[in-house]
Amino acid sequence: MEQISLQEAQHAKQAAASLGRSSAEQRNRALLLAAGLLRERQDEILAANLVDQQQATQENISRAMLDRLSLNAPRVEAIAKGLEEVAALADPLHLEDSWRRP
């Protein structure tokens, strides 16, 4: 498990560096692509989530945690819309600093 976590951390660090070098247009296209893929692959996502829910139930996780884990079509759509909303925001990485020290 620790090995997987270390690998994931290394990948995240590499992705963060790549993200910092990307343009706002590239990041927004990626967000919109992800939103589209969520919608396109919703059935596959929900089927995999059902397996996760079943495993979690067998492991006796709390109802609150099971609710957080559970996906349905409206939740997937809300995630996709959230990605689109983020894409519509001003670019947070390359904003000019409008505040000046007095």
Image (spheres, rainbow, N blue to C red):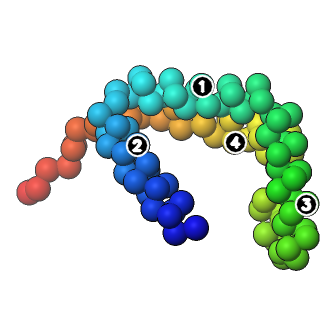
Q: Which residue lies most toward the left here? A: 102
Mark 1 belongs to which amino acid?
Answer: Leu
Residue at the spot of label 2: 15
> Mark 3: which amino acid?
Gln
Please tell me which of labels 2 and 4 falls first in the chain: 2
Q: CA distance from mark 2 to mark 4?
A: 21 Å
Q: Position of residue 91 (x, y in %)?
A: 38, 35
**Residue 33's mark?**
1
Label 1 SS = helix
Of residues 40 and 47, the one drawn nearer to the viewer in this rendering: 47
Amino acid carrying mark 4 in the image = Ile
Q: Position of residue 42 (x, y in %)?
A: 81, 34
Q: Position of residue 63 (x, y in %)?
A: 87, 72
Please indicate, yes or no, whether residue 94 appears anywhere in the rendered image. Answer: yes
Q: Is residue 26 left or right of residue 71?
A: left
Q: Residues within 10 Å of mark 3 (few under 14, many from 20)?
A: few
Nearer the observer: mark 3 or 4; the answer is 3
